[in-house]
Image (cartoon, grey):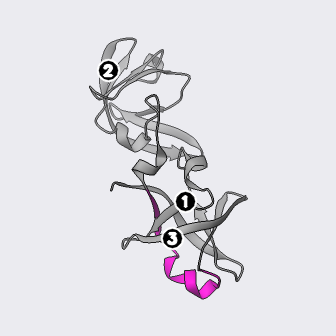
Amino acid sequence: MKYICVGKIVNTHALKGEVRIISSFEYKDRVFKKDNILYIGSSKDELKIETYRVHKQFDMVKFYGIDYINDVLKYKGSNVYVDEASLKLNNNEILISDLINYDVYNDDKLVGRITDYRNDNGNKLIKVNDKYIPYNDNFITKYDKINNRIYFHDIGVFL
């Protein structure tokens, strides 16, 4: 089983065991659903989602069997994981974390390799040649998962 970090529990909410999760995960709609399994903390405690809602910038989750604030306090500050197999990604979908060490091509010309990524106020960026460039579908033309390559169009201005 390969665990993918999808967020972090930053606090509790009210008294009934609901938690606030901060997440910039790109496939939240597949993760935060009723009856999905999440793995919490370094011990990967397996918890099933009872309810989910969005409140401000938080993903609010209540787990089955956890009905009091005292039951979730131990998870405050813990990372939240999902099993990668449960995401069921299509061939044209890829996790941004899997792009590390991918070769980057701009209009079929090798321009560098991805060494890092970050989320800057909702804008996804990848680091190529010590510069952060936008990771945006408007620039991406193709993923080559077999050869670990990503093809862009018109990103020369960023490099």
User: Which label was assigned to residue 94?
Assistant: none
Check disc 3 and give the amino acid type: Leu
User: Which label was assigned to residue 111?
Assistant: 2
10 vs 41, nearest the viewer: 41
Q: Quadrant of the C terminus?
A: top left
Q: Tag 1's secondary structure?
A: loop
Q: Is residue 113 left or right of residue 117?
A: left
Mark 3 neighbour class, 10 Å CA radius: few under 14, some 14 to 19, many 20 or more: some
Residue 146 in percent (x, y) is at: 28, 27
10 vs 87, nearest the viewer: 87
Tell which tag, 1 or 2, sits nearer the viewer.
1
Check disc 1 and give the amino acid type: Asn
Residue 26 in percent (x, y) is at: 54, 44
Q: Is residue 136 left or right of residue 34?
A: left
Q: Is residue 84 left or right of residue 71?
A: left
Identify residue for label 1.
36
Mark 1 neighbour class, 10 Å CA radius: few under 14, some 14 to 19, many 20 or more: some
> Residue 130, relative to residue 78: is it above or below?
above
Mark 2 neighbour class, 10 Å CA radius: few under 14, some 14 to 19, many 20 or more: some
Dot 3 or dot 1: first in sequence order is: 1
Check disc 2 and give the amino acid type: Val
> Residue 13, relative to residue 147: is it above or below?
below
Q: Tag 3's secondary structure?
A: strand
Q: Image point 30% across, 25% down: which residue?
A: 112
Identify residue for label 3.
47
Q: Are marks 3 and 1 in contact (CB under 8 Å)?
A: no
- Asked if residue 69 is among those painted magenta in the image, a careful observer would answer yes
Q: Image point 67% across, 57% down: which residue?
A: 57
Question: Which residues fall within the magenta stretch?
Answer: 66-82
Dot 3 or dot 2: first in sequence order is: 3
Q: CA distance from mark 3 to mark 2?
A: 43 Å
Residue 61 in percent (x, y) is at: 63, 66
